[in-house]
Amino acid sequence: SGLKSIPESIGNIITLKKLKINNNLLEEIPESLGNLTNLMFFHCENNQLRTLPESLVDMKNLSNFICSNNCIEYLPECFGELTSLRTLSCYNNKLTFFPDSMGDITKLEDLRASRNK
């Protein structure tokens, strides 16, 4: 058992700095998440996510993003706009490529992407 959905209203909590929604049954994340521009840590591993919202790239302060152990097939094309990102862990998903914009994340220190298809 676990959370099956996250309400769109989560985007109203604009003071949120850390969001950990690990080990649930989530298949999607609401677009309103992009409103969380103060978010620095977003952990959503061990769910059933297939996609990530395009609005993810609006979280300009995001420095730690963990989305491992899901079913994610691609990262948003403009993922490179997350220029504050230092840690990206996306292993054990269904990724087959990174968007070209990844090269714009010049602060990235830790990238974990093993066991993708």
Image (cartoon, rainbow, N blue to C red):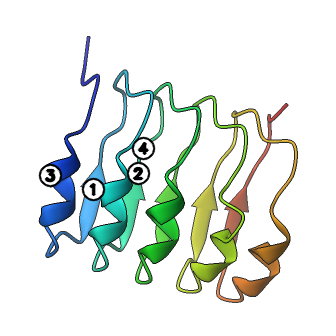
Report the residue marked by disc 1: 19
* Quarter-of-image position of residue 60: bottom left
Tell me the quarter of the image containing the N terminus.
top left
Residue at 47% over, 63% down: 56
- Label 3, residues with CA under 10 Å away: few <14, some 14-19, many ≥20: few
Q: Position of residue 28 (x, y in %)?
A: 43, 35
List the residue tagged with mark 4.
Answer: 44
Residue at numbered disc 2: 43
Q: Which residue is mark 3?
A: 9
Q: Nearer the viewer, residue 48 or 76?
A: 76
The amino acid type found where label 2 is placed reads His
Residue type highlighted by circle 4: Cys
Name the element at disc 3. Answer: helix
Query: Is 116 left or right of 80, judged from the image as shown?
Result: right
Q: Earlier in the sequence, mark 1 or mark 3?
A: 3
Q: Residue at x 58, y 77 (%)?
A: 86
